[in-house]
Image (tube, coloured by chain):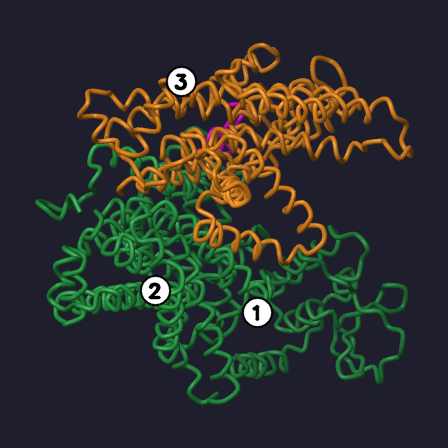
Chain colours: A green, B orange
């Protein structure tokens, strides 16, 4: 950025030296007027001067280092304690004290931004021109239209030209001449910008009094056609995007529910404190982050990886302690277990408030999890969500391996199917209970690490997930790992596909109602256990 | 009469009721403020609130303690009753709102021009009375019918009712629902034209709550001592055996579940004008689970237990949230853990144990209170 700026400065210098024509001092002085309208007028006038000096003046105004002297007749730039005349650049010596710079509000700031952008179109640097053109797309300074059109006409770079033409068309569509508007609307059909679509859609939407923002019927038809074209182009991107966010939400649900699929699905323990294990996992990430920041700042980017085993061990230990100290007395009494674990969840929430404060704590994304892949139309696929999708799959795989390929898994399945028989063959059932519950809690801890990368980390983090997680497990079918995976991804996708029509909250309600209805039809969930174990 | 309670119990009930429903209101209204015997409006409102809670605990006890169905939606029915009466209270504000127009303020704020269709009739007191019963009753009936027909029971049922409550809370948080969104209903002015904050109105609501609690207690006692009560207890202890005997347990469960919802709804309607606000947070799943702990603390499967539990837990809550707000959740959490682990029969069970220790040859406890054999999941 600094390089670009000094480049611009050099270019400006080169341009300014031969020309050295001063700006209109009267117009510059108007920048300090009391009336906002007058000031905006002046800014717009400066924007069309094509004079590089105007950039310095406007930038000074934006930095609040412009002041007026001589009863508002002369504007001066204050820089490093030195005064210079804003219009001519003439040095005026040391700045007197008590000189009040012109205060700018947000509206003026916006005007300054687009004015500078318009002025930058004259730059010989491609990146500068492109940035200027992009910025002008959102502007409504109609006076900039001739400049944009002139710049587009002589622009040689295809990308900059396209952006300029769009920016020009966005302005021209507000023109008072219907012919100009039609031409602008036709050109806008090439856009992939959601903002352009929004603008076009507004023009053809009937207002409350029955009129349209675009009064002319023929123009409206063209606008509608362009809108359709833009929609068509964006639709595919948006479908892909909805699929991605569905998958992303699904994988988050999956991470939240997988531990529950073990503790509830396999062991039949209703753990209402499950959400709090997610919360503990997220706080573990926060603590590891703090340790890395103070002790290994060089490896800070990898703190998330280090947090995984820490979160797993901490939550698994707490889970095992809970199982040994409380839950084992309640086996066979699921309703009591529900109430007790709810109490445990209250204790854990309040404990985290006492330790870490009631406010959310800040967990920073490491560099490799920030940013994302930019898509057509200004959409972004964030890296952290992509990584979480992959991570969820890895965790599912790991859990599957543990349950199906290890000795512990064999014991777990044995105890689930027939506790008495497993005990007779020498399986230490109590130990297995403890370890299974620890595994489920640990997996929740891993989910907490993932959640810390995409949302707020606070004492209430788990509360938002508990109902959803139970729904996933219930829908997937108790005791079914595959059912849990499919239910999580399915619910995530349904919610995300409903969202554009109904909004996030209504989508969530719809999904909940859907599950309640579904359970009526298939009380055993998507994947029912068959045979003897179904009765257990 | 004597079939319901033995005579000494009746006298105790009437003594407590007379103290709560007659003596305290008289002390509130007739004794001037500042006098040592004056009961302040704070206490009247607080106890009025608690009596509404006690009815909900009683309803919870009927459905959970006697029938073995742990409902995590009792808070939803309570809030629905509250909302139904709140609509009437909102209409009674008339043009005294902030914007001085006929519509409730939140609708003006949303730029709505007329009342949505489901607000039709909210002006009528009788219609709102009907809604207070019908809204929770109908929802419970429909939901219960489908749930019980699919033989959803045990924890499954609890979780589904929790999901229902959660979904309803999200829905009521939306402004588009037409129930005031986040803020719900508040700033009530009158009931039937009389100012809602006047001491007489407050006392009247309080007395009504007291009478309602007394009525609910007698009704519940009548149910649990009737044949219906025997069937309900049998459903709790061995539902499949009962079905083999030819009982359609669906209808028994549906009846008691709907009755419990209606009881909670009416309690909510009495509660809202006393506290002066109803908003969606009343529907949060946490509130419904808290209701279960009132019943558990007092003692499930007894009728006086849940009433005591509601008073005890809420009394503790009022004290903690003023004196040690940060320790309230610790207390509540521990209550959940310790009561289920160590006091499965609650305070009533504890009292019984103490009494029996004092008089070891005494007759065994009442039959209804005895079994706590858990239904299989």
How many neighbours does mark 1 have within 10 angstroms: few (below 14), some (14-19), or many (20 or more)? few
**Residue topped by disc 3:** B226
Q: Position of residue A345 (x, y in %)?
A: 46, 56
Report the front residue among A350 and A155: A350
Spatial CA distance of label 1 from label 2 is: 21 Å
Tell me if residue B233 can be seen: yes
Give above or below for A251 relative to B275: below
* Relative side of B129 to A436, left or right: right
Q: Position of residue A127 (x, y in %)?
A: 45, 73
Report the front residue among A80 and B290: B290
Give above or below for B163 relative to A78: above
Spatial CA distance of label 2 from label 3 is: 46 Å
* Relative side of A299 to A355, left or right: left
Q: Main secondary structure of the magenta part?
A: loop
How many neighbours does mark 3 have within 10 angstroms: few (below 14), some (14-19), or many (20 or more)? some
Q: Where is residue A339 in the image (x, y as percent from the top left)?
A: 43, 48
Seen from this angle, which residue lies furthest left?
A531
Q: Which residue is drawn at 37% across and 80% down?
A: A306
Tell me if residue A226 can be seen: no
Label 1 or label 3, whichever lies nearer to me, is 3
**Residue topped by disc 2:** A441
On residue A355, the disc is: 1
Q: Position of residue B41 (x, y in %)?
A: 78, 31
The numbered mark 1 sits on a residue in which chain?
A
Labelled pair 1, 2 in contact (Cβ < 8 Å):
no
Spatial CA distance of label 1 from label 3 is: 53 Å
């Amino acid at each position: 950025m600094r390089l670009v700026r000094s480049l611009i400065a050099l270019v400006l210098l080169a341009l300014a030296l031969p020309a050295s024509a001063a700006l209109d001092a009267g117009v510059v002085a108007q920048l300090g007027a009391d009336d906002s309208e007058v000031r905006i007028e002046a800014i717009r006038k400066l924007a069309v001067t094509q004079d590089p000096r105007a950039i310095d003046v406007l930038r000074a105004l934006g930095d609040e280092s412009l002041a007026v002297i001589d009863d508002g007749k002369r504007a001066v730039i204050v820089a490093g304690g030195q005064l210079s005349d804003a219009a001519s650049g003439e040095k005026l010596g040391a700045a007197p004290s008590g000189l009040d710079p012109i205060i700018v509000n947000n509206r003026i700031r916006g005007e300054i931004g687009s004015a500078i952008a318009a002025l930058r179109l004259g730059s010989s640097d491609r990146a500068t021109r492109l940035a200027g053109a992009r910025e002008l797309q959102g502007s409504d300074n109609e006076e900039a239209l001739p400049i944009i059109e002139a710049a587009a006409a002589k622009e040689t770079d295809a990308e900059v030209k396209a952006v300029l033409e769009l920016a020009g068309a966005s302005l021209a569509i507000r023109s008072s001449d219907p012919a100009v508007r039609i031409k602008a609307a036709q050109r806008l059909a090439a856009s992939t910008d959601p903002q352009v679509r929004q603008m076009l859609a507004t023009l053809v939407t009937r207002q409350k009094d029955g009129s349209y923002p675009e009064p002319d019927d023929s123009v409206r038809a063209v606008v509608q056609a362009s809108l359709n074209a833009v929609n068509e182009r964006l639709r595919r991107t948006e479908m892909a995007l909805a699929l991605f966010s569905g998958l992303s939400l699904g994988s988050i649900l999956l991470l939240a529910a997988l531990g529950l699929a073990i503790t509830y699905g396999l062991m039949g323990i209703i753990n209402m404190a499950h959400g709090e294990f997610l919360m503990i996992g997220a706080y573990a990430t926060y603590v590891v982050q703090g340790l890395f920041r103070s002790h290994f700042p060089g490896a800070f980017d990898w703190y998330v990886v280090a947090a995984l085993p820490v979160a797993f061990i901490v939550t698994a230990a707490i889970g095992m302690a809970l199982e040994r100290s409380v839950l084992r007395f309640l086996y066979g009494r699921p309703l009591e277990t529900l109430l007790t674990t709810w109490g445990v969840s209250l204790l854990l929430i309040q404990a985290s408030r006492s330790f870490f404060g009631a406010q959310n704590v800040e967990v920073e994304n490491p560099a490799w999890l920030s940013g994302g892949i930019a898509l057509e139309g200004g959409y972004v696929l964030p890296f952290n969500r992509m990584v979480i999708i992959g991570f969820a799959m890895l965790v599912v795989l790991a859990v599957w391996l543990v349950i199906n390929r290890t000795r512990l898994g064999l014991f777990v399945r044995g105890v689930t199917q027939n506790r008495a028989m497993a005990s007779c063959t020498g399986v230490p059932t109590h130990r297995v209970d403890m370890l299974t519950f620890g595994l489920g809690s640990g997996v929740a801890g891993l989910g907490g690490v993932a959640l810390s990368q995409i949302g707020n980390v606070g004492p209430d983090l788990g509360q938002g997930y508990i109902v959803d997680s139970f729904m996933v497990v219930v829908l997937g079918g108790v005791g079914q790992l595959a059912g849990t995976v499919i239910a999580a991804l399915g619910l995530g996708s349904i919610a995300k596909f409903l969202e554009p029509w109904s909004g996030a909250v209504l989508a969530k309600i719809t999904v909940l109602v859907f599950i309640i209805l579904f359970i009526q039809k298939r009380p055993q969930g998507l994947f029912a256990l068959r045979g003897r174990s179904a009765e257990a | 009469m004597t079939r319901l309670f033995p005579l000494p119990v009746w006298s105790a009930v009437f003594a407590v009721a007379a103290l709560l429903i007659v003596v305290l209101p008289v002390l509130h209204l007739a004794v001037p403020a500042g006098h040592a015997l004056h009961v302040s409006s704070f206490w009247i409102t607080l106890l009025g609130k608690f009596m509404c809670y006690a009815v909900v605990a009683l309803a919870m006890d009927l459905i959970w303690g006697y029938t073995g169905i742990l409902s995590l939606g009792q808070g939803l029915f309570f809030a629905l009753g509250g909302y139904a009466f709140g609509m009437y209270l909102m209409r009674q504000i008339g043009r005294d709102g902030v914007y001085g127009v006929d519509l409730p303020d939140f609708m003006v704020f949303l730029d709505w021009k007329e009342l949505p269709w489901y607000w039709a009739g909210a002006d009528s007191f009788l219609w709102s009375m009907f809604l207070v019963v019908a809204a929770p009753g109908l929802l419970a009936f429909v939901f219960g019918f489908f749930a019980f027909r699919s033989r959803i029971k045990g924890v499954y049922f609890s979780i589904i009712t929790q999901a229902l409550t959660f979904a309803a809370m999200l829905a009521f948080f939306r402004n588009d629902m037409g129930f005031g969104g986040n803020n719900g209903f508040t700033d009530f002015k009158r009931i039937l034209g009389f100012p809602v904050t006047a001491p007489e109105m407050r006392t009247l609501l309080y007395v009504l709550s007291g009478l309602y609690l007394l009525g609910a207690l007698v009704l519940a006692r009548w149910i649990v001592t009737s044949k219906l009560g025997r069937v309900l207890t049998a459903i709790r202890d061995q539902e499949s055996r009962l079905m083999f005997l030819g009982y359609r347990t669906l209808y028994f469960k549906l009846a008691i579940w709907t009755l419990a919802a209606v009881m909670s709804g009416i309690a909510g309607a009495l509660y809202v004008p006393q506290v002066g606000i109803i908003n969606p947070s009343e529907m949060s799943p946490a509130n419904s689970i808290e209701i279960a702990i009132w019943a558990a603390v007092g003692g499930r499967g007894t009728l006086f237990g849940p009433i005591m539990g509601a008073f005890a837990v809420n009394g503790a809550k009022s004290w903690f949230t003023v004196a040690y707000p940060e320790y309230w959740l610790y207390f509540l959490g521990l209550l959940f853990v310790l009561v289920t682990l160590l006091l499965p029969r609650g305070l009533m069970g504890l009292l019984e144990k103490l009494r029996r220790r004092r008089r070891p040859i005494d007759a065994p406890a009442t039959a209804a209170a005895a079994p706590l054999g858990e239904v299989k999941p």
